């Protein structure tokens, strides 16, 4: 088991380095440099060259790449060109919010999606639940955000339009602060979860319909078990098996969605940092964000691999 | 029993008594309270003397002061300087500073702060001060604790308009002398003299400021707390304003301003905003390219584009059709009617294109040109494409973010046409020279995009820059504009105004300056 974990860890490191290199390549070839972002629309003669020299952009790409990879291996993400602050600090400031968003959205989509899938599978002969879920699955995050805001914030006035806190008064402490932040996150989490939630519901519905046709369910029914009982006790655990690895694999997508949602709700998360840094050509921060996302995706997959044997006894053999 | 007339009079009296206190209440501003201003970009840091980035200046203007301030018409009024004197030869400008001003950390403000800010920071790091001011300034010297003297190499009449909080914010010498201003910790925890003190900054979220109780202008500011909230998405900004989560939008697009009308908001259109004023949406022709290099093609743009329709459909009537190469807001330099000869006339445009040998191909097209622009300007491209179709001119529109745009247009010069919002500033020296003068061709973002070289025009701009007398300067600029209206290195579309919006319960925001909330207050 230890060897298995070590193998996975080494592979993960390779993936992260590859992602960082790809990000470096894209950043290096992006048109324009950081000067415009730094100076606004009024540069002085020689300013572009000066900025390029200051950040080593006049060196050959391979040299800069080697330098960055070397620092990355030592755990150093470098310094932001735009703000002069360490990239690790900038990311650490943003990470909790994005983690809260994605974990809450993941949890919501798995739990609510399973329940909805369960309910939808009971109406196996009706087409509308699947059609509705498929339609909602196709709604882009930004549109979902706008619709939710129009209904629950502007229409009913129940929840805030944007932000993580009401800034009119100095911030409260302790539980009051947490409650306030939670209130601000309801709409963003829902908008972010919608896509994944529909996906989970469709997956569970299809899985349950399939499992309910298996002989072991027929046998359970023959023993006198109710359909609902068989669905819950026997079919559901089997239908849920693909959920853990698929949820983990789609975490990357969720991080991408967080980028849109953070912009729509003006939340200071990692996605916003990545976007503003990309526009400002603040390459160290962009690469830092990519590395963070890659590490997160890798950890999620490790977690899914770790959980799988507990869900599926057949996989325990692979660990021995 | 009272007669009907007395009854009416009594009612009128009652109504008047009710209305009077309301009217008085409306006129009198409350003290205290908070205002939340939505801005679209994160400032990054809060040192306005080392950067000209718009999002930074929108916030930092409330923390700092300039030597002088600019009123809504762009005229200099006292700020940190009480008074100033220019010698008749224009080579020495002396300022008297206001006594008793203290920094937010309690240190006294003196002339040494001004000297250090200019010599060590502004003239080296602030892009506009470095290009616009540094070449003219020979020395900045103190004259006692409250006197500061600018010695100039040549007369520089634009100087007074380059000293406000956006163009030349004054930093504390006790924190900046001998340091590297780009890494100074005070950039993250700024200490200024301005109406509001720094309290906290969370990146991409908000900057919180509190009232400076010892501000040097009596009874100001009125608000206790000022919050700049970073909201990148324009429709989220509008929703937040409507929901009462923010009180003011520092910048509203023409379309959104239209949406906010009649919903209890104060909407103000101004010609200036921190970091830009008197802006003209302009088509730059790359004169180095064979097709845009032809006079007939540029004439065809001037004859073929219906700018009145653009004003209505794209700018929602926020602004004016550009009447001259220099904006009408710079009244003394503007040449009214300089572009009046160019009226929409499709037939004439086609005739000129035919005469120049730009014949239509089998597909009816004479030319297909690249048009480069910022994503925010895409509506302009759409209407241009429609209006140019009858001339047989097709546009290949490329939207690029600012960094990519600057590289394509100013470094690689790989474009036929570029759409640029050129802000003229409060003096043609500040914002017009850079797009016209042949010395401004080169690898400098937002300089002479056309690559225009006309020695006569260069000489007129040089002459206007060296004169003291505004009337004589205006004459030179007007002569230059009549040549520009003939050569058409650019085609000037619309003078665009800035719009700001705030909730009706607030008053006296000043969106045309960096000191946006110095006088603002609550009305309820």
Image (cartoon, coloured by chain):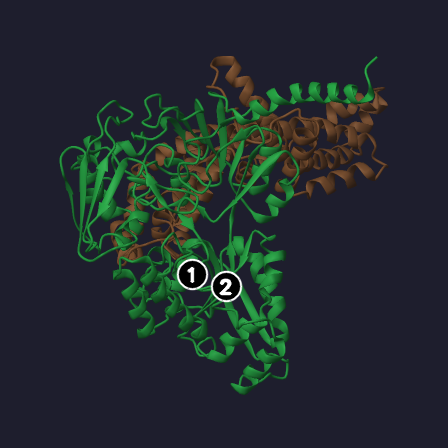
Q: Nearer the viewer, residue A250 or A97?
A: A97
> Is residue A48 in view?
yes
Q: How many labels does the image show?
A: 2
Percent position of residue B94, x then y: 20, 44
The answer to whether residue A150 is above or below residue B7 is: below
Q: Nearer the viewer, residue A33 or A228?
A: A33
Q: Which residue is drawn at 47% across and 14% down?
A: A173
Give the quarter of the image for residue B451. Answer: bottom left
Left or right of residue A187: residue B479: left
Percent position of residue A261, x then y: 57, 37
Name the colour assigned to chain A in the rendering.
brown
Give the letter of the chain under mark 2: B
The residue that disc 1 covers is: B334
Give the quarter of the image for residue B352. Answer: bottom right
Looking at the rendered structure, which numbered label has been put on residue B323? 2
Alpha-carbon distance for marks 2 and 1?
9 Å
> Is residue A79 in view?
no
Pointers 2 and 1 in contact (C-beta within 8 Å): yes
Q: Which of B215 and A221 is in front in this view?
A: B215
Question: In terms of sequence position, does the residue under pointer 2 or pointer 1 come before the other?
Answer: 2
Tag 2, which secondary structure?
Answer: loop
Left or right of residue A127: residue A53: left
Q: Residue at x 29, y 55 (%)?
A: A44
Q: Which residue is drawn at 82% across and 21% down?
A: B4
Give the letter of the chain under mark 1: B
């Amino acid at each position: 088991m230890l060897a298995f974990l070590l193998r996975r860890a080494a592979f993960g490191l390779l993936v992260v380095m590859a992602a960082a290199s790809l990000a470096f390549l894209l950043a290096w070839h992006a048109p324009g440099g950081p000067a415009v972002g730094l100076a606004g629309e009024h540069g002085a003669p020689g300013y572009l060259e000066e900025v390029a020299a200051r950040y080593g952009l006049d060196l050959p790409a391979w040299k800069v790449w080697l330098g960055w990879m070397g620092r990355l291996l030592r755990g150093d993400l470098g310094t932001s060109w735009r703000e002069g602050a360490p990239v690790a600090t900038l990311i650490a400031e943003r990470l909790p919010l994005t983690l809260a968003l994605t974990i809450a959205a993941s949890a919501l989509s798995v739990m609510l999606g399973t329940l909805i899938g369960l309910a939808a599978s009971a109406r196996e002969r009706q087409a509308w639940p699947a059609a509705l879920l498929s339609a909602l699955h196709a709604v882009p995050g930004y549109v979902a955000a706008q619709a939710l805001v129009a209904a629950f914030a502007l229409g009913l006035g129940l929840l805030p339009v944007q932000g993580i806190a009401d800034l009119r008064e100095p911030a409260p402490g302790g539980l009051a602060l947490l409650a306030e932040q939670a209130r601000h996150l309801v709409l963003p989490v829902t908008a972010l979860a919608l896509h994944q939630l529909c996906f989970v519901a469709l997956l569970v519905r299809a899985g349950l319909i399939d499992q309910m046709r298996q002989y072991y369910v027929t046998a359970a029914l023959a023993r006198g078990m109710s359909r609902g009982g068989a669905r819950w006790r026997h079919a559901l655990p089997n239908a849920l098996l693909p959920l853990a690895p698929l949820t983990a694999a789609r975490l990357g997508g969720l991080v991408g969605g967080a980028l849109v949602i953070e912009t729509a709700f003006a939340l200071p998360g990692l996605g916003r940092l990545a976007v503003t840094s990309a526009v400002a050509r603040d390459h160290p921060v962009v690469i830092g964000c990519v590395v963070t996302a890659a590490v997160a995706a890798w950890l999620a997959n490790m977690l899914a691999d770790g959980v799988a044997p507990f869900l599926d006894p057949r996989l325990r053999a692979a660990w021995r | 029993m009272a007669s009907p007339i007395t009854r009416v009079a009594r009612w009128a009296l009652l109504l008047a008594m009710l209305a009077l206190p309301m009217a008085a209440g409306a006129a009198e501003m409350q003290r205290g309270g908070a205002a939340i201003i939505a801005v679209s970009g994160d400032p990054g840091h809060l040192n306005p003397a080392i950067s000209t980035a718009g999002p930074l200046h929108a916030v930092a203007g409330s923390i700092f002061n300039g030597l002088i301030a600019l009123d809504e018409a762009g005229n200099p009024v006292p700020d940190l300087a009480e008074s100033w004197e220019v010698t008749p030869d224009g080579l020495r400008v002396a300022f008297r500073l206001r006594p008793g001003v203290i920094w937010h950390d309690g240190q006294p403000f003196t002339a040494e702060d001004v000297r250090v800010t200019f010599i060590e920071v502004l003239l080296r790091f602030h892009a506009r001060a470095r290009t616009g001011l540094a070449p003219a300034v020979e020395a900045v010297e103190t004259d006692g604790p409250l006197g500061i003297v600018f010695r100039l190499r040549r007369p520089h009449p634009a100087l007074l308009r380059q000293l406000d909080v956006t163009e030349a914010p004054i930093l504390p010498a006790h924190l900046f002398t001998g340091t590297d201003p780009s890494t100074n910790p005070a950039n993250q925890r700024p200490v200024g003299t301005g109406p509001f003190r720094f309290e906290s900054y969370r990146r991409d979220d908000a900057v919180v400021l509190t009232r400076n109780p010892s501000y040097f202008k009596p009874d100001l500011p009125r608000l206790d707390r000022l919050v700049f909230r970073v909201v990148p998405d324009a429709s989220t900004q509008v929703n937040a304003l409507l929901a009462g989560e923010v009180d003011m939008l520092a910048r509203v697009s023409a379309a959104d301003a239209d949406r906010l009308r009649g919903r209890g908001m104060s909407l103000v259109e101004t010609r200036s905003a921190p970091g830009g004023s008197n802006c003209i949406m302009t088509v730059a022709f790359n004169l180095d390219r064979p097709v845009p290099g032809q006079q007939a093609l540029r004439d065809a743009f001037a004859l073929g584009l219906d700018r009145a329709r653009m004003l209505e459909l794209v700018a929602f009537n926020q602004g004016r059709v550009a009447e001259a190469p220099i904006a009408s807001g710079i009244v003394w330099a503007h040449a009214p009617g300089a572009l009046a000869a160019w009226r929409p006339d499709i037939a004439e445009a086609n005739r000129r294109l035919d005469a120049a040998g730009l014949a239509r191909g089998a597909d009816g097209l004479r030319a297909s040109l690249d048009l480069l622009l910022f994503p925010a300007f895409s509506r302009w491209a759409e209407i241009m494409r429609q209006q140019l179709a009858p001339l047989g001119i097709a546009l290949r529109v490329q939207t690029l973010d600012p960094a990519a745009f600057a590289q394509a247009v100013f470094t690689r010069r790989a474009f036929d046409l570029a759409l640029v919002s050129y802000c003229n500033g409060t003096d043609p020296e500040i914002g017009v020279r850079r797009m016209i003068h042949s010395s401004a061709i080169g690898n400098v973002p937002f300089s002479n995009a056309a690559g225009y070289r006309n020695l006569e025009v260069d000489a007129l701009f040089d002459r206007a820059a060296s004169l003291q007398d505004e009337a004589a300067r205006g004459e030179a600029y007007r002569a230059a504009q009549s040549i520009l209206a003939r050569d058409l290195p650019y085609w000037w579309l619309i003078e665009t105004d800035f719009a700001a919006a705030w909730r009706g319960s607030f008053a006296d925001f000043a969106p045309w300056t960096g000191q946006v909330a110095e006088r603002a207050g609550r009305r309820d």
